[in-house]
């Protein structure tokens, strides 16, 4: 049986429902070293709901004070306009400000960092890497048009 978008979405939601609470707990515990080389927990307040969100997600490090996450769905819209966030990473919680990137040129440059540091990210975003390590432009364009965004987190 071939997977359809709806079965892929249902599988993804099931994995999130099971994995996210476990990952959040581990990443905020003394056992964080098991996962924190690839995952962080980003915490932010929903703009409309006022609800506090704590989401485990893969990341790439841009430099000592900047991280990069690739986000599908619509929750990244809460991070537009320099949203204040908290990031639990490597056993520490740091504050940060976000910068959402949806432009294709900048996204291509940034996603190259993501692919180099966390190749599994390509599977989740359906963006393949070319032989030179850069993202396939058609895949990237399709992802951006479908609601995918890259978010820089400037740590404070």
Image: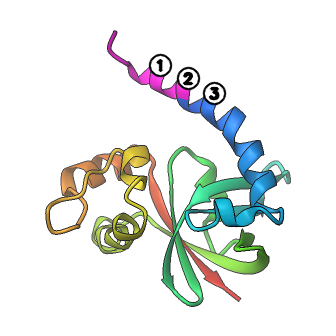
> Residue 46: in sight, yes or no?
no
Q: Mark 1 and mark 2 in contact? Answer it, CB < 8 Å.
A: yes
Q: Mark 3 and mark 2 in contact? Answer it, CB < 8 Å.
A: yes
Determine the CA span between mark 3 and mark 2.
Answer: 6 Å
- State the image coordinates of residue 123 (x, y, percent, origin top left): 38, 45
**How many numbered marks appear?**
3
Q: Please report whichever mark, 1 or 3, sits nearer to the chain's N-terminal start.
A: 1
In the depicted structure, whether residue 48 falls above or below residue 1: below
> Dot 3 corresponds to which residue?
14
Left or right? Give the position of 141 relative to 39.
Answer: left
Residue 5 part of the magenta segment = yes
Which residue is outermost to the top? Answer: 1
The span shown in magenta is 1-11
Dot label at residue 7: 1
Q: Residue at point 82% right, 66% down?
A: 30
Local SS, label 2: helix
Local SS, label 3: helix
Local SS, label 1: helix
Query: Which one is in front, 65 or 147?
Result: 65
Q: Residue at point 31% right, 50% down?
A: 127
Q: Residue at point 62% right, 74% down?
A: 98
Q: Quadrant of the C terminus?
A: bottom right
> Dot 2 corresponds to which residue?
10
Query: Which one is in front, 37 or 148?
Result: 37
- State the image coordinates of residue 41 (x, y, percent, origin top left): 71, 61
């Amino acid at each position: 049986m071939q997977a359809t978008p709806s079965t892929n979405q249902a599988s993804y939601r099931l994995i999130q429902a099971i994995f996210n609470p476990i990952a959040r707990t581990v990443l905020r515990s003394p056992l964080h070293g098991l996962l924190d080389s690839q995952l962080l927990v980003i915490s932010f307040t929903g703009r409309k709901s006022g609800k506090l969100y704590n989401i485990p997600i893969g990341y790439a490090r841009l430099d000592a004070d900047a991280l990069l996450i690739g986000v599908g769905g619509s929750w990244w819209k809460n991070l537009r306009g320099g949203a204040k966030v908290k990031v639990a990473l490597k056993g520490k919680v740091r504050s940060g400000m976000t910068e959402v990137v949806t432009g294709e040129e900048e996204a291509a440059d940034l996603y190259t960092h993501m692919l180099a540091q966390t190749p599994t990210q390509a599977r989740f975003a359906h963006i393949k890497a070319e032989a030179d390590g850069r993202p396939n432009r058609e895949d990237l364009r399709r992802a951006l048009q479908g609601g995918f965004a890259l978010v820089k987190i400037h740590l404070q």
